[in-house]
Structures are given as C-alpha cells and as structure tokens.
Amino acid sequence: MSTENKNVTIIGAGLVGSLWSLFLAQKGHNVKMFEKRADLRSGRAEAGRSINLALSDRGWKALESVQIDKKVREIALPMKGRMMHDLDGTTTFQPYGMEGQAIWSVSRSQLNIELLNAAEEAGVEMEFEVKCLNVDSESGICSFEDREGKNFDVKSDFAFGTDGAYSAVRNSFYRKDRFNYQQMYLTHGYKELEIPPGDGGSFLIEPEYLHIWPRHEYMLIALPNFDGSFTCTLFFPFEGEPSFESIERTGVRDFFEKYFPDATKLMPDLEEVYNSNPTSSLVTVRCFPWVFDDTVCLLGDAAHAIVPFYGQGMNCGFEDCSILIKHLDESGGDWKKALQDFQLERKRDADAISELALNNFIEMRDKVADPVFLLQKKVEARIQEIYPEKWVPLYSRVTFSHNPYSEALEIGREQQELIDKIMSVRDIENIYQKDDFKDLLKFYLQD
Amino acid sequence: MSTENKNVTIIGAGLVGSLWSLFLAQKGHNVKMFEKRADLRSGRAEAGRSINLALSDRGWKALESVQIDKKVREIALPMKGRMMHDLDGTTTFQPYGMEGQAIWSVSRSQLNIELLNAAEEAGVEMEFEVKCLNVDSESGICSFEDREGKNFDVKSDFAFGTDGAYSAVRNSFYRKDRFNYQQMYLTHGYKELEIPPGDGGSFLIEPEYLHIWPRHEYMLIALPNFDGSFTCTLFFPFEGEPSFESIERTGVRDFFEKYFPDATKLMPDLEEVYNSNPTSSLVTVRCFPWVFDDTVCLLGDAAHAIVPFYGQGMNCGFEDCSILIKHLDESGGDWKKALQDFQLERKRDADAISELALNNFIEMRDKVADPVFLLQKKVEARIQEIYPEKWVPLYSRVTFSHNPYSEALEIGREQQELIDKIMSVRDIENIYQKDDFKDLLKFYLQD
C-alpha cells in the first residue's frame, strides 16, 4: 500500500460505522470508534430502531470486500419476492427478480455484532456509551462526554460521522454558512409488531417472502427471522381516519381483525406488543456538503437518511464505503481529493435513492394491490425475458446491480414511459404472452 | 377588547419583532422583548445585514394598523420603477405599476428605531444584548444569557420567535420529532457597496428608481438613501468565472470598470468599501410547524426566510403580523385556535413568496436585459390598460395588493401561459398598440 497510515476517528458504531472502521483498519489505518449506545455485545443494549433489514447486492458487495459475507450469509434468510395478502386472505406472489435472485432478511443487531467483532479483530479501538458533543473540522478535534459525564477530546487526521439520521457530527455543521440541509418527515409513522414462531421454531407463514398487506393508504409488512418469528411493521398515518391516533381510541384489535384478519390470527399478543413498542417517525435527510475542511466526512444515514420502502438504507450506506474506499485507493494517498471526488460522485446517487424510496411507498402500499399494476409487472418480466441484456427492470437495477442509483432512476423513467405505451395496446393482457409480442416490442424498442 | 391580557415574550427586536410587540402592546398585552444585538438607538449597534429595504403595500398596511405609517413615510423614498443600465451606459425605464404606484426605499435601522420607539411608548419592555439559549414550549420558559454571561429564565403565556433567518428560537425545536426544516443557500452571495452623495447631498443618479445593472449571471442594484447616497448591492457567484473568488485575484476595479462602467465612475472608494464590507450568503429557510405546543410561534424570517429579489422579505414578515392579529381578533381570545389558523393559512403563502423570490432573481439579473422580455412587459401593461379590473400583473399583485401570495403565484402562472400565446402572435410588437388588439385579447381571454 502506497498511502500513509492515518489516525481516524469514527463517530457512530452502527452498521455503516463498524463496516467503515473495518475497511480502514484492513488498509492499515489507526481507527478509534466511539458510540453513544452501549455495546450491543454486552447484552445491555437498547433495542435498535428496526429489528430486521433487507440486504441486497450493493450491501453484499461491500461485505465481500472485507471478507465478512460468508459469516453474514449464515445469519440471513432469502426472500425471493413479495407475497401480497388480500383482505380475504388470498395471497399473490410477485418475484423480485429472476430465478435465483433474492433479498436477504437479516437481524440488525446480529449483523452489527458480526461487524463489530470483525472490526475489533482488525485492530479498531472502540468506546461505547460516549456521546459526541462537537466536531471541529479546522482543528481536527472531536469532543465527547463519557458515561460519567466527563468531557474529553480526540485529535485525529480524519473524522467520519456515521451516527445516523440524527447525526451529532452533522449537527456540529448545521449552522455553518452555506451548509444546505433538509429534514422532511412523512405524515406516516411506523410501529413494529410480531408474528411469533410456531411449534418447534416453525414459520407460521411462508418464510421465503417479504409479506405485504397493502391497504392503499397504509400497509403491514412482515420479514422472517431465524427463530421462526416474523417482524411485522405497520406503516400508518399519525393522524386522520384511520391512524395511530384513531385506532388507539377505537380499538387496536378490532381494527387489525377487520383489515389484516389472516395476520391478526397469528398475533396473540397484539395489544401488548402494540402498546409496548414505540410509534416512530419516518425522516428523509438531505444535505450538502458532506465533507468539511477536507477532514470530516459524513457517511450513511448521517449524510442521506432515507425512508425504508426500497430496502436500500443500509445497502446505500454500505455502498458509500465501497465507493469511498475506491476513491482512496485511486487517489494514491490524497485523502483531500478522494473525499471531494466521493461527495461529488455520491450526492446525486443519494438524492436518487432518496426519491426512489419515497416513490416506492406508494407502490408497496397501493399499487401492488392493483391488478393493472401486477399485469404491468408481468409484461415487464416478459420484456426482460425477451431482452435479458437490454431490459433490466428498475427494481432489479436498484436491488441486484451496482449501477449508480441516479442512472437507475433515469433509466427507470424512460422505461416507465415505454411501459405506459405498451400497456395501452388493446388486449395487452393476452398479447404479451404470445410469440408476436416480440414484433410489437421491436417496434417500441426500435430494435 | 374581549380577550384576556396575556404575558408575552418576544425574542428578536428587529423589524418584525418590534412591529409585533407594538401590535400586542396596543391590544393591552404585557410584552417583554429580548434582543441579542445592542440597542440600535444607542449608536453602538453593529451594522444590520442590509442597509436599505423596499417597503410596499403589504408592509404599509401593517404600519397603518399601528398608526406609524405617517412617521415612516417621512423617512422613505419612492421608487416608481426599474432603471436598467446597459454596458454602454444606456438606461431603460420599466415602471413597477400604474401611475402613482411605487415601492419605497427605507433605511433598515431608521425604520427599526421608529418601531422600537413606538413600542416603548406603547409599554413594551425591552432588553438588549441578551442571547436566547432555549425556548421550552411545554413549560413556557425562555432561557437567556445576559451581557455579563449570567443565565436567567422568563416564563410567559406565549413566546414569539422573531429572531430572523438564523433563529435561536427555531433552533430549540429543530431536533423535535416531525419538525420539517430546510435551509438552502444560493451559489450566489452579495456584497454592499456605495455611490456617495454629490455636492450638497445631491443624487448622482436619478433617485426615483431602483437601478439595475443586469449582466445575466450576476447583477448590481442601487437603492436611494435620504442623504443623497445610493446603497449598491452586487449579487455575484461565490465561485467560478467571474465570481467573488476570481475578481479578488484579477482585480476588483478592473472588473467593475469593464462591466459597470457608469456606476464605477461614481464609486471613488470602491476597493476600500469592497474590502471592508463582508461577502454574505443568501439563504431560503422553510419549516413547519411554526407553532409548538400552542404556546410558541415563529414569525417573519424565523419561520420563512426568503431571498431578497422580490423585495418582500420585510413586507411578508409585516403581513404575518397583520394576519396573526386578525386571527387573534376573530378568535375572541382563543389563542390556541388563532395560532393554528394562522400557521395553516400562512404557510402556503410563505412558500409561494419564497418561490417567487427565487424566480425573480433570474428575471432581475437576466430577463430585464432582454428586449423580448421588455416587449412582453409592455404588452402586459397594454392588457392591463384594456382590462384594469381583470388583469393585474403578477408583480403588481405581489407588490401593490393584499391578495394572498399563493393566489398571486397561481394566477401569475395562468397569466404567463396566456402571455406566451399572445407573444407568439405574428407581428405582436406592432399589433399590441393598435385598436384591434382588443379583439385579439377578447379571443384569448374568452371575454
């Protein structure tokens, strides 16, 4: 390695922070990582914000780079498509990609523990229950408060803010002149619920899918866990009819039995779990710059928190690490250049996935319950079958490729225009399966 | 008055704060106002952010409500239109409205002093050089630090944050769950310069206009002052070619002589003033809610800072006061309802003027130098002449009316579509002055 070893401070030992510490430690840098929460491995840690997450190709690629993918594969469950649940319990399957493609349900805390262990083995020093008070990009000094309330400073060559959507590092810069910043909340919030395992740790609904109960203005989803349980999440308006506010008045179980009857049967402790779990908000954060005085850099949610509807929050944060390490490798030790190149390349992709994630909420809660939309997905799958190289659907490009998100968004828009035209062809519901659909496609794709 | 008297804290004694304190004191409420800066009237005050401002009808209306308009009229200079200066010194006049309509150049500090004096006379208590540390909307306690560094608390029924674009009051709420917030900077900044008075306090360019040197990507403007001087403002990119960064390398006077030759002749101390005045940034702030726990409310720039290109920042803040007092009057003492109604009515109008102000930068620096745009303005003036009731141009609706900004934006868009059609009529440059233009108009306006 041609580059000099640096002293690096990482603030935030969540998924992105611990992965990034591992990347840097493996390159030989001296890394100290600080985390506000208790060590997850101590058993005393508070519950994370969401219990399980969907790992997809961008995330896997970063995990492969630090040779931790095999370990993680052992704690991950593949979900090969969406399983939609109607009001009457009828289910409809929609694959995420082609045969063999899947996204992977993984426990946030288990994944974080694997990353922390690997980082520690690679030489990363860690301190927990330490609160970041301020980061000064001019002096390179990060100020902390330890668990006894004592303040201390750490001076290093570079500092990274990987402390999430409510980043304290970013907060040090938010009043800085010409810092563009936006925090935007949805009128929907979410609450986590549970379908417990059946006898002997069996799954009570099919484990190989992401289950969705789409109800237009709101939805329930469920992801499988290794112990046979499912973590369910209700995405629901805060106010109005119905809403968290209204069903707490009119009865939670009544509401669930009416709108999610098949799921509710599998939730014996519904009210208890409902009342003990918090109702959380959904924020999108956009800001720029991410790099301050060439010494401090935001990564992951601290730079670009997104809503969870594309399953890309963690994957995007992990890809940040892949892309920044690429720039560091290419720069031959010029960190200033690498950090600048990183933020200039990555900002438009973060904005793109932010937009895609917001749009996908509508698709998941509303469109997947619409027969026309499902037909459109089938037509698109047929186009992909005919032109496997040429036609990669938007979802696949985001989830199963490493194309920049901004490119995916752009191509997705062009594809949508074409699909809209093809869907307006008379009798398309029968034509698309026939042989001469190829001729029609040739016309539209100007082959 | 049917309503109970309230104890009210106002944080920020700038233009909007001192006007709002006056409104409330005149209604009999007990008002205490706190300001971070020194008392402007002490003579020790630091320079305000901008030296003069344009008062228009919305501002005047609020000043009339508190019977201070006559005093202010004595310190204000009318500007009846734009005077554009070409590279070769040729000037072109474009009226702002109809005969008799004008916007008024007024000194920020003089206007503020008048408002502070009136507020004090009306019984408002004031403390200066007191920094707001925090506002707690649940307890109603505002925390301050005085000039000796001592902290103290003030408890009141209601608190108003009128402390500007970088509001400390708003800052108390920015990490609150579900608080939507955005700060967005232009890539242009500004610097204030001066054309000094001529002999015996005479004006060296015509005083009755807002002068503009539009140069496409940037511009210089000048507003008259009572002492015969003009305050000039250069709106200019921070980086690139040309920019603040580049001309400091290549020579300020050279640049000015090349691009603003007629103005530069009148600026003997250009370099000195250029070097001593700061280069400031231009921020747009949007947030919601403005009201917290029914006790704390943001007003003016603290709620909705906008860029200065429509001359509406102060006017919009003053109109906030008019509209909030209307809701307080109508609510019969129900402050909770009044504050809610205010923020729900006003948010869309603040968003509208925010957008209009951003758009007007392009108009001022670029379009006013375009003959087609000037012809369009003439055609529009002719339409207004034919249909004075029906056709109020966007600029007039914003500047010389009390229609909600959101309505102005909406109608402005519809009008622009019509104007675009009319401007594409063959030979329009000759037709619009003729009698049969009325028939053409009838067709387009579907009269």
Image (spheres, coloured by chain):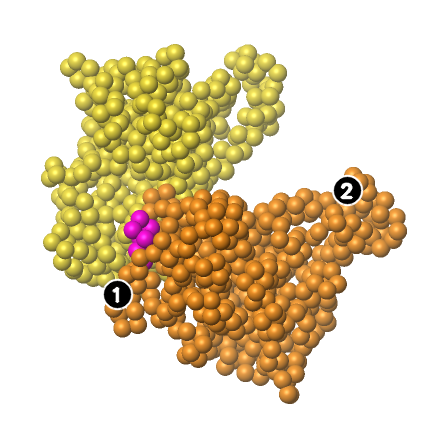
Chain colours: A yellow, B orange
Residue A38, image quadrant: top left
Chain letter of the residue carrying label 1: B
Relative placement, left or right, of B93 versus A380 is: right
Q: Which mark is residue B339?
A: none
| Residue under numbered circle 1 | B151
Look at the image and say whether residue A308 sits in the magenta stretch. no
Describe the element under mark 1 as helix, strand or loop.
strand
Q: Are marks 2 and 1 on the same chain?
A: yes
State whether residue B388 is above or below residue B122.
above
* Magenta-colored span: B133-142
| Residue under numbered circle 2 | B445
Residue at (54, 63) in percent of width and height: B66
State whether residue A15 is above or below residue B389.
above
Farthest bottom residue in view: B199
In the rendered image, residue A331, in percent from the top left (x then y), is placed at 33, 55
Mark 2 and mark 1: span between their CA atoms? Answer: 63 Å
Residue at (70, 63) in percent of width and height: B101
- The front one of B413 and B77 is B77
Residue at (42, 52) in percent of width and height: B4
Q: Quadrant of the C terminus of chain A?
A: top right
- The front one of B285 and B4 is B4
Residue B74, image quadrant: bottom right
In the rendered image, residue B336, in percent from the top left (x then y), is placed at 42, 45
In the rendered image, residue A86, in percent from the top left (x then y), is placed at 40, 15
Describe the element under mark 2 as helix, strand or loop.
helix
**Dot 2 and dot 1 residues touching (CB under 8 Å):** no
What secondary structure is the magenta-colored segment mainly? strand
Identify which amino acid the numbered label 2 is placed on: Leu
